[in-house]
Image (tube, rainbow, N blue to C red):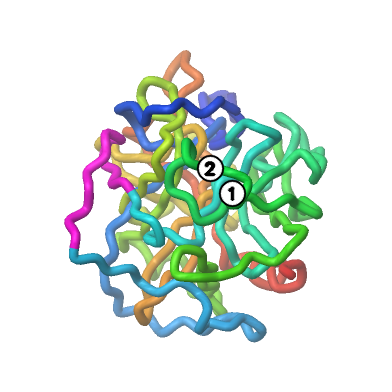
Amino acid sequence: MFNGKDVCRQRRRRVSVETEAPAGVFGSESVVVTERSRVVSTTTSQPESLEEYDENECATAYSSSEPAVQSRIIGGVSAKSGEIPWHVAIFVEDQYQCGGSIISSRSILTAAHCLTKENTNETLEADLLRVYIGIVNLANKDDHFYHTASSAMLHPDYNSAQHTTDIGILQLSRDIIFNNFIKPVCLYGNTTDISAFYNRYGKVAGWGLNRNGVVANVLNYLDMPVVSQKKCSQTNVQYNTVLAYGESFCAGHSDGNSVCNGDSGGGLVFTDNYRFYLRGIVSISAQKRNQLMCDPNRYSVFTDVSKFLKWIRQNMV
């Protein structure tokens, strides 16, 4: 419950991975967040990358002569190898926990609640965390794909009770080797107001729960539009407190295309200049009445990455 309302937090429902990717809903977690992708051109001003960030390394827009494969996740598309090269799977010991985005050779950006003990501000021990990179099927993961963590860092203002400032950085113990299938996502270098993104579609990916409450093995993505705070608040009054902080925004559909439990921490990205830029992190979404499951017919809340660029720059390695 959040402010007297049912809210699903996109994360911490740790579930062992099944060998089949069943039909269902695109996932997130306890305050559930969801996304779906469609790349749309924009007329907004050209983004600048962070000063020390090598933009030439970050992910370019993927093109394929093959048609997209429609997955059984509602509204989702199954990702091919290299199509979402920044997206990683964060495990706590042997259980899938959350998604995250590569932002440098040793830094993964994710939601703070993905790096904490359940419903607390207490950070998980780094030696419990594994990060799998460059994979699209969790059933095919092996030791070649994982990195151990050296530290898990929450933003100092993170509040687990209010679900605010939901952002964290996972630092790895060794460098990621970039290639065509593994690349960091670009970071915007300015703080363009989120209103410039209203009705613009971004892409989100994840291995979240489907309608049957099972984690999908195959990475899926969707396109989803950013919606205005006014529109989001009118249909999701339980988000008003979170949105009032000015560090989050809403995105999604009201037609069953959404993220769900397990999608938390994944990035909402937009294309500019043929590159993918990270703007949001899956954080929370509405919960179905009397169920520990996201409601795919309602909008989700994303942490606004642009509000934390200075903190990210200071702490990425």
Residue 132 — which label?
A: 1
Q: Quadrant of the C terminus?
A: bottom right
Identify the residue at horizontal 32%, vertical 28% (top origin).
24
Q: Is residue 215 left or right of residue 311?
A: left
Mark 2 vs 1: CB contact within 8 A: yes
Bounds of the magenta segment: 66-78
Between the C-alphas of marks 2 and 1, the distance is 7 Å
Dot 1, how many residues are within 10 Å of its Cα: few (below 14), some (14-19), or many (20+)?
A: many
Q: Mainly helix, strand or loop, the magenta region?
A: loop
Q: Position of residue 57 (x, y in %)?
A: 52, 78
Q: Position of residue 124 (x, y in %)?
A: 78, 39
Q: Is residue 193 left or right of residue 225?
A: right
Task: Name the quadrant containing residue 274.
Answer: bottom left
Q: Is residue 172 left or right of residue 245?
A: right
Q: SS of the residue at dot 1? A: strand
Q: SS of the residue at dot 2? A: loop
Q: Amino acid at mark 1?
A: Tyr
Q: Position of residue 235 (x, y in %)?
A: 37, 37
Q: Is residue 138 left or right of residue 151?
A: left
Residue 80 in sight here:
yes
Residue 256 in sight here:
no
Q: Give the mark, 2 or 1, whose residue is nearer the N terminus.
A: 1
Specify whether residue 75 is painted magenta.
yes
The residue indicated by pointer 2 is 141
Residue 51 — which label?
A: none
Specify whether residue 192 is painted magenta.
no
Identify the residue at horizontal 59%, vertical 49% (top origin).
132
Can you say whether 161 is above or below 147 in the image?
above
